[in-house]
Amino acid sequence: MSTETQELTSMQDLVSLCKQRGFLFQSSEIYGGVNACWDYGPLGVELKLNIKDSWWRAMTLRDDVEGLDASILMHPRTWEASGHVEGFVDPLVDCKTCKGRFRADKLDHAACGKKPSLKPGAHGECELTEPRQFNLMFKTNMGPIEDSSSVVYLRPETAQGIFVNFLNVQQSMRQKVPFGIAQIGKAFRNEITPGNFIFRTREFEQMEMQYFVRPGTDRDHFEKWKAVRHQWHLDNGLRAHKIRFHEHGPKELAHYALAAFDIEYEFPIGWQEIEGIHNRSDFDLRRHQEFSSKKMEYFDETTKERYLPYVIETSVGCDRALLAVLCDAYRIEGERTVLKLAKHLAPYKAAVLPLMKKPELLELTDKVETLLRKKMKITRDESGTIGKRYRRQDEIGTPACITIDYDGLADGTVTVRDRDTMAQERVSVDQLLGYLARND
Ligand code: ATP
């Protein structure tokens, strides 16, 4: 067997694996699919929950960060204050010839509908319209009457739910600046050019944390959070040489930002943002104070000062982080495809495999299964040769395969095969939980 290792080179290979093995399906597939929306299947939802859990733990298992779950629909004034009604726009151009629709600022990465090897506008046959500004927020109406007074928006980011609750959280939890608020939730953007699988979708989930600090200390906190967030991606298994920081230059900075760094991952489509770390100054609290006419200031009881804190924001797309994890884990090693997922992220922690469907082996298999199920998500597979079953588990990233054979009936042991090294070790059933935990 050849041992040559290949990494993921085409997103399409990952899309196929994800569909076949129950990670992700195109939304409403039986109706031809809906563009830019995806459904997480049984293994995808486990992986996603594990990513959210790892983020939640990293961000909230500390006494200076509180959690929040704000609603998706907010008062429409929120989005005027935040600047989204006016400024959350992308420049849209249409091609009069190929009828394609593109983001004017991303033409370099786009392909003409008629001649995909060419960039839109780069050849005579493609005639582009002048760019017009297109607002990315989805609008809907609240209540039975559809008029301008009932317009509400599906939130395009989770952050504003945190800003409007800043004082509620600070006062109810008796927090002192510096402290943060963390939230995981859905966001919606009517993207002009969604695509590249779950990289850019119109409905996605964000994991955001806003850290409120005293003005003047913002630079230090910014540097600290940059390091914390970089480490989180490494802890999820992303290889160091596949992630880097990209600093926003003056032209890239959002209207609210004093400084911004993206964490980028090298996808098969090139280096792309997976997370943004922003110094938002006091922009958001100041604007909400102005638009709501409610004081948003923090009162420092020690110094007796009132001030609007600055905000350091860390904002990562759950789906995009998950895509990076999948891309990074994907390998073809000789005959096998393997997802080298970090163990804490793997959908199943172990697979229980009786060597044959013989009653005495199944009895011991039941015992092992019951023992493990209480502690972790596992699967059981009885069909096909043991080699095929190992391959099936490799492909979905299961770190350990536990085979129950005849030797085990005599001495109470099982064989544990490691996904990455393929090494096999005999382990006593009594020691199994400890053995699997040790390999976490
Ligand atoms: P981009 O430049 O890719 O449109 P952005 O700079 O607008 O992204 P932010 O507003 O900073 O992104 O959002 C924070 C994070 O949310 C991004 O780093 C990304 O992980 C995620 N995200 C943003 N838009 C989408 C989307 N359409 N689909 C999936 N994830 C997204």
Image: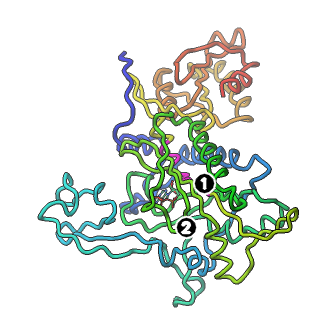
Quadrant containing the C terminus in the rendered view: top right
Relative to 252, 257 lies left or right:
right
Residue 42: x and y in percent read 55, 46
Q: Nearer the viewer, residue 325 or 22?
A: 325
- Give the amino acid type for the residue marked by disc 2 in the picture: Tyr
Q: Which residue is drawn at 72% across and 57% down?
A: 180
Residue 22 drawn above or below residue 188 = above
Q: Residue at x 87, y 65 (%)?
A: 301
Mark 2: few, some, or many residues within 10 Å (few <14, many ≥20)? some
Residue 397: x and y in percent read 53, 33
Q: Does the magenta stretch include residue 437?
A: no
**Does mark 2's beta carbon lie closer than 8 Å to ligand 1?**
no
Q: Which residue is drawn at 44% across and 68% down?
A: 190
Q: Is residue 317 magenta?
A: yes
Residue 53 drawn above or below residue 205 = above
What residue is shown with label 2?
Answer: 256
What residue is shown with label 1?
Answer: 314
Sequence-wise first label, 1 or 2 = 2
Mark 1: few, some, or many residues within 10 Å (few <14, many ≥20)? many
Q: Foreground mark, 1 or 2?
A: 2
Which residue is most to the right?
302
Residue 27 visible somewhere in the drawing: no
Q: Which of 363 and 400 is in front in this view?
A: 400
Residue 39 visible somewhere in the drawing: yes
In 3D space, how far apart are the residues under numbered discs 1 and 2 (Cα atoms)? Answer: 14 Å
Residue 323 drawn above or below residue 38 = above
Secondary structure, mark 1, is strand
Identify the magenta region.
313-324
Q: Quadrant of residue 358?
A: top right
Residue 378: x and y in percent read 63, 34
Q: Residue at x 52, y 18 (%)?
A: 422
Q: Which of 348 and 151 is in front in this view?
A: 151
